[in-house]
Image (spheres, rainbow, N blue to C red):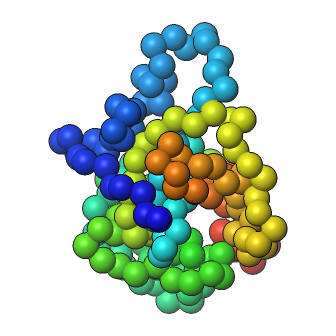
Amino acid sequence: MKAERPRIDGDIPYSDDGFYLYEDPSEMSGDDTETTDELTVLAFALADEWYAVDVTSVVEVLDLQPVTKLPNLPEYVVGVANVRGSITSVIDLLRMMNIGATSMGVESRILVVEGEGVTTGLLVDDVGAVTSITVDSIQPSLSTIPETEAAYSRGQVEFADGTVVTLLDMNQVMRSSRMRFDNE
């Protein structure tokens, strides 16, 4: 079952429960000293599946833009794009995990993320809701999930509408040897 895509208010994606994706993650809570067991996540589609990442790893969501293919890069590197004056790699996460390929369509976006001090763009089929989940609601990765996908996953979580998403750990994605192109 596909999660309903959120409506857009200006250029800020939001979910029906009113959680907005802020430019500065500290703006999301009114009190910086309060600890919480909640996690705010951004859902996105890759092929027929929904994934989510912690919004603190999201730099921005861009409309699909020109991507320049460079020679001698792995097939999962779509190319590079100019993101506000910085040349940024654009990765096809499905290809990187060896579970398919992302198609470029009308709803496709580039999700600019950061982890392990590295910023990169992820080609995604669609961007869904920004919502809060409790840390306790994260279930361990299913044994039926491909090993390459499970290696980048914090587990699965069920959204309020019943959609089950795979919660990705951007630090794990960025630590991957597949993200290192210098043949160390």
Residue at image x 53%, y 46%? 159
Q: Considering depth in this image, is 68 or 7 the residue closer to the camera?
A: 7
In the rendering, at what x and y percent does residue 126 appear? 37, 64
For the C terminus, give its image quadrant: bottom right
Q: Considering depth in this image, is 165 or 69 the residue closer to the camera?
A: 165
Q: Is residue 15 above or below residue 4?
A: above
Q: Considering depth in this image, is 86 or 25 the residue closer to the camera?
A: 25
Asked which quadrant contains residue 12, the reply is top left
Q: Considering depth in this image, is 129 or 175 the residue closer to the camera?
A: 129
In the rendering, at what x and y percent does residue 140 appear? 78, 53
Residue 22 appears anywhere in the view: no
Residue at image x 35%, y 79%? 104
Asked which quadrant contains residue 54, the reply is top right
Residue 139 appears anywhere in the view: yes
Residue at image x 58%, y 37%? 133
Q: Is residue 69 above or below residue 7?
A: below
In the rendering, at what x and y percent does residue 142 appear? 76, 63
In the rendering, at what x and y percent does residue 120 appear? 51, 60
Q: Is residue 140 above or below residue 149?
A: above
Residue at image x 39%, y 38%? 21
**Residue lying farthest left?**
10
